[in-house]
């Protein structure tokens, strides 16, 4: 079954606890055509949002053309690290990998949403999601606790 045809039934798959839909990568020439249509910013980047199949937004990062190409061709999510100025293969040091289920570009072609199968936690703080600072009338409030310590996550 093609992943595009199967995605409509993903909610049923998740609710039954079945395995996620398998991502089928496009041919390299199609990936190149897709990347040629993407509107990268002046730094050659687009924002990349990772979302779990249940709708939880896991993280926001950045991709350059090489990271997007690698992600679309392999199905293993790769970002661009702005601080290290190099490709960042999610889970390379922590083991907390993201496997692509589906990728969607927005209407302006300058942002990508990736539905991912997340191994472990997405956030370097040990939380499932990086979006845990809730805004309340009294200020910020943590909405979740770490599921794993930094020592366990990175062996430090």
Image (tube, helix red, strand yellow):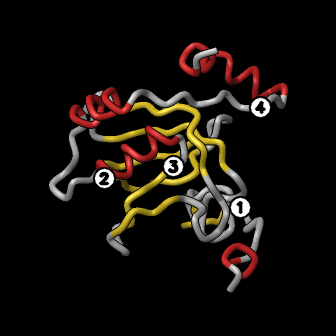
Earlier residue among tags 3 and 4: 4
Earlier residue among tags 2 and 1: 2
Residue 136 visible in the shown view: no
Q: Which residue is mark 1?
A: 144
Q: Which residue is mark 2?
A: 64
The residue under the point 68% across, 59% down is 121
Q: Are marks 1 and 3 in contact (CB under 8 Å)?
A: no
The residue under the point 68% across, 57% down is 128
Name the spot of residue 139 as percent of width and height, x first. Answer: 54, 67
Q: Residue furthest right?
A: 16
Q: Are marks 4 and 2 in contact (CB under 8 Å)?
A: no
Taking 13 as reference, is 90 above or below it?
Answer: below
Residue 6 visible in the shown view: yes
Secondary structure under tag 1 reads: loop
Q: Which residue is mark 4?
A: 19
Disc 2/disc 1 C-alpha distance (Å): 31 Å
Disc 4/disc 1 C-alpha distance (Å): 26 Å
The residue under the point 77% across, 65% down is 147
Disc 4/disc 2 C-alpha distance (Å): 30 Å
């Amino acid at each position: 079954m093609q992943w595009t045809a199967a995605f409509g039934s993903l909610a049923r798959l998740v609710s039954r606890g079945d395995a996620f839909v398998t991502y089928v990568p496009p041919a390299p020439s199609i990936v190149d055509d897709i990347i040629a249509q993407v509107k990268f910013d002046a730094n050659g980047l687009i924002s990349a949002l990772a979302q779990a199949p249940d709708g939880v937004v896991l993280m926001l990062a950045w991709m350059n053309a090489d990271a997007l190409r690698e992600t679309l061709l392999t199905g293993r999510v790769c970002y661009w690290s702005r601080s290290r100025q190099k490709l960042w293969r999610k889970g390379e040091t922590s083991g907390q990998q993201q496997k692509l289920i589906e990728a969607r570009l927005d209407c302006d072609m300058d942002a990508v949403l990736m539905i991912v199968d997340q191994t472990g936690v997405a956030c370097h703080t040990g939380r499932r999601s990086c979006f845990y600072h809730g805004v309340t009338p009294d200020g910020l409030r943590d909405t979740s606790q770490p599921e794993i310590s930094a020592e366990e996550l990175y062996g430090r």
